[in-house]
Image (cartoon, rainbow, N blue to C red):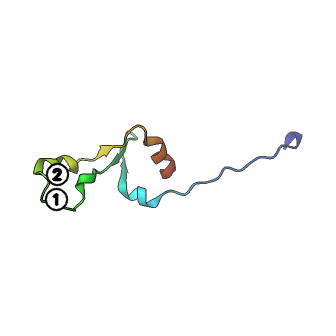
Amino acid sequence: MKNGTKKVKKIKHKTKKSLMKKVKITGTGKIMRSHQLRSGHLRRKKSKSALRRAARPIEFHKTQINAVKRMLGL
């Protein structure tokens, strides 16, 4: 290296496999997640319209996107 400077290697981060199983990346690059209400616990009490609404994937909030991308290695 010139002038005695040393080149520092970048650290490769591992992908969080548990997050990879829970999210889906669309063709346009959006990161989608499932809704909390979708889980099977106490579903009888929840209205049918709420369960249908929860069946559709939703996008992560804009404040969480950078952290999620970092965990996914994007």
Dot 2 alpha-carbon crowd within 10 angstroms: few under 14, some 14 to 19, many 20 or more: some
Q: Residue 60 appears at what percent x and percent y?
A: 36, 43
Q: Nearer the viewer, mark 1 or mark 2?
A: 1
Residue 59 is marked as none
Who comes first in sequence, dot 1 or dot 2? Answer: 1
Residue 47 percent across, percent down from the top left:
11, 51
The amino acid pointed to by label 1 is: Arg
| Residue type of the residue flagged with mark 2 | Leu
Q: Classify mark 2: helix, strand or loop.
A: helix
Horizontal relation, residue 23 to residue 7: left or right: left
Q: Residue at x 42, y 56 (%)?
A: 19
- Dot 1 falls on a residue whose secondary structure is loop
- Tally the numbered discs: 2
> What separation in Å lies between label 1 and label 2 (alpha carbons)?
8 Å
Residue under label 1, please give it: 43
Q: Quadrant of the N terminus?
A: top right
Asked whether the residues under the numbered discs 1 and 2 touch, taking CB atoms below 8 Å apart as contact, a structural biologist would say yes
Label 1: how many Cα within 10 Å (few below 14, some 14–19, many 20+): few
Which residue was labeled with disc 2? 51
| Vertical side of 9 occupied by 41: above or below | below
Q: Position of residue 39 (x, y in %)?
A: 25, 59
User: Picture coordinates of residue 4 (x, y %)?
Assistant: 88, 43
The residue at the point 50 percent across, 56 percent down is 15
